[in-house]
Image (tube, coloured by chain):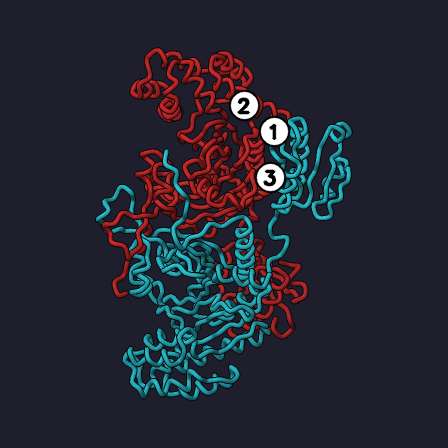
Chain colours: A cyan, B red
Amino acid sequence: MATIQKPSIPKGTRDFNPIEMARRNYIFDTIKSVFKLYGYQQIETPAMEQMSTLMGKYGEEGDKLLFRIQNSGEKIAEAPEKGLRYDLTVPFARFVVQHREELQFPFRRYQIQPVWRADRPQKGRYREFYQCDVDVIGTESLMSEVELIQIVEEVYRRLGLRVCLHLNNRKILAGIAEVIGAPDKMMDITVAIDKLDKIGIDKVNDELLERGLSKQAIDKLQPILAMTGSNEDKLATIGQLLTASETGTKGVEETAAVLEEVKRLQVALPIELDLTLARGLNYYTGAIFEVKALDVQIGSITGGGRYDNLTGIFGLPNVSGVGISFGADRIYDCLCERNLYPESMLEQTQVLFACFGQDELNYAAGIARQLRQQGVRVEVYPEPAKMKKQMAYADAKQIPWVAIVGGDEMANGTVMLKNMVSGEQEQVTLDSLELKV
Amino acid sequence: MATIQKPSIPKGTRDFNPIEMARRNYIFDTIKSVFKLYGYQQIETPAMEQMSTLMGKYGEEGDKLLFRIQNSGEKIAEAPEKGLRYDLTVPFARFVVQHREELQFPFRRYQIQPVWRADRPQKGRYREFYQCDVDVIGTESLMSEVELIQIVEEVYRRLGLRVCLHLNNRKILAGIAEVIGAPDKMMDITVAIDKLDKIGIDKVNDELLERGLSKQAIDKLQPILAMTGSNEDKLATIGQLLTASETGTKGVEETAAVLEEVKRLQVALPIELDLTLARGLNYYTGAIFEVKALDVQIGSITGGGRYDNLTGIFGLPNVSGVGISFGADRIYDCLCERNLYPESMLEQTQVLFACFGQDELNYAAGIARQLRQQGVRVEVYPEPAKMKKQMAYADAKQIPWVAIVGGDEMANGTVMLKNMVSGEQEQVTLDSLELKV
């Protein structure tokens, strides 16, 4: 242990200091409190999963982004059997199948844990980040979609962030693929138009061509991607276009039912039917959602959808579920940019006892002990130090009161209490101290 | 995605179901609430650290137990540069050095995160488990030891678990090594007597002999290891034995000062001066602690100590700190065995709306929305199902009330409310529903 190492952390990972933690906890606690209002229950799964659980679930690109884990004891040449979880959805599917005998269906679960991806790190993209997932599995009821929309509404209402929910349905996309004459290209269309926001319509069309769509099919797709108007207008138009497609018609009906119920419940969240919304993941089969902040340029901050057979690969076929994932990092950035964190969030120390000698320290420790028994958050500066240093400490930790104890105070059972905002100080008795701070 | 996989998780890891999560959260929340009373602030560090940060910090055995991480893109033959964190102490030291310009010293931090060790899994020993660490760094004041002892007292008082704190001091152990004529064997003595509880005095003596201690030195050690009596008696005896050792005398003085202050503050926690307490880790330099449950046979459930140079390896020498770690898994087992979890901990759904048709479902969804706005935790069964199935669902989730809605109720603006404990049911108006559940 002799050589000195300059400390660093792996690229794409982060330390979180106390202020960052308080903000993150505020977001997690807000989200959790809403999940609980709807009866969702928390689970956790291990950071590492079997490689066989992870491989092949995220597409070829995803497989390459998995972090693999080796025991130090293993030979380096052996292929690792374990990997770090890449998302919370596949572990959830694995959990549901493995524990199906213990669970009540429909099973409402939430899960807030980090995931790891060996992505190239860049601004806003990390190799370790938290996901907050909420899913209900074991029911096909569209009431679940309506419930998740209400959860989105309530979470962002509590956070004070204005958002819009974009809604589409994979069955509509499948219907579109059918009616433009490319029924087998549904996934290609999905993957390509998922990039519309990022690369624009021309490049999407190029990609569609590359992926084997005919010029004619692409031409037929254009008016659909460019469709405007109210949700009702769009639904009517796409409904007519898709009459020949059974799947497409089902998608239109599902979407209409969800929008109708949301309207009946007077959900205040703006919702936009967005026929260009595709979402890249290939397990979605029904409604798909994405939430965007209205006042911050940051992309999607929440997303999800319905899947009909996520658990099939683990031996439990035909169990439908629907879920959404809140992107904690982007929400964090949004709240920073809009200055939306509450002041009380830090739960900082309420009073610091300054320290000028051992006797004073012992006296302060006794008072501090009593105050803590009343629930007051108290620190005692643990050793004599210059007044200036101790005041700077209190300022930096945003502690509102400093209690100063000297010979006089010890003799008459008081403390000198200094308000760190106004600078005023006042001698108070021990009995009244709790009421002051 | 065609082959069906039987789902499993890597050995030594665990899934946590909702009840287990509620219990774990109860423990974490209790511990956190006490940490905050003393001004400790939360940080988090990445799951993965540079291998150079981890290697050589946990002894030869520890190095072998590190999990190494590879990007999928990397060649398997390359030695991995990253590893999963093995504890929270080394990442904390790395954090303090890396962020020293942003921190206020003395820096009080707590950290609750999982750690990973490629240990052979066995009952009560996992490859992934949580640690709850609390440390103050940047002061040599013994008031910090006193503070941590009060934290231990308050955490276990809140949890309702009777415990005893075992206290020793590495300087006393160093003094003992000196006076028995083996001053260079302090670490060997520490490692050997740390096993006293597990392997007994005879095997400890065998190991001391193997580690190169003379028969004479071992003989001299025996009365010290066998010492009994009150803390005051032991301190007096060991104080006399160590008069020739400057370090040993300092250790006795430190211990006396801590015990005196704890007595003055009327700390109710039983504390035993235990000269056989050694703790294996080689960075401790002063007070060392271990906490044992009095009514559960499970070994140490909390432990820690003072270190004078943990940050030295990362380039910041001579920064003294002291900390303890609460073992969440063992505390979990203790509370289970003593049946100490509070009933209210689950925060389960308060009322379930049963569902018998689409109209009833819509009606229920509207009432549920209003109740949630009042803060009531409500579920709506999302699809029509047999009464028996829905009641079984409510029972399994321990939901105390089920609201049943039929044509009559919809017509006159009421619900039929069933108490799941007594089985009684009553028709209540929507206005009075909130007060009932």
Question: What's the CA distance linking mark 2 and mark 3?
Answer: 22 Å
N-term-proximal mark, 2 vs 3: 3
Image location (x, y in percent) of residue A144: 48, 68
Closer to the eye: label 2 or 3: 2
Image location (x, y in percent) of residue B246: 49, 17
Pointer 2 residue: B254
Pointer 3 residue: B38
Disc 2: CA contacts within 10 A as few (<14), some (14-19) or many (>=20): many
Pointer 1 residue: B267
N-term-proximal mark, 2 vs 1: 2
Question: Disc 2 vs disc 3: Cβ atoms closer than 8 Å?
Answer: no
Outermost residue to the left:
A77
Disc 1: CA contacts within 10 A as few (<14), some (14-19) or many (>=20): some
Image location (x, y in percent) of residue A32: 53, 57
The answer to whether dots 2 and 1 both sit on one chain is yes
* Mark 3 chain: B
Relative to A60, B419 lies left or right: right
Badge 1 element: loop
Q: Residue B123 falls in which quadrant of the image? A: top left
Q: Residue flagged by tag 1: what amino acid is it?
A: Val
Q: Residue at x 37, y 58 (%)?
A: A117
Q: Residue B7 falls in which quadrant of the image? A: bottom left
Question: Disc 2 vs disc 1: Cβ atoms closer than 8 Å?
Answer: no
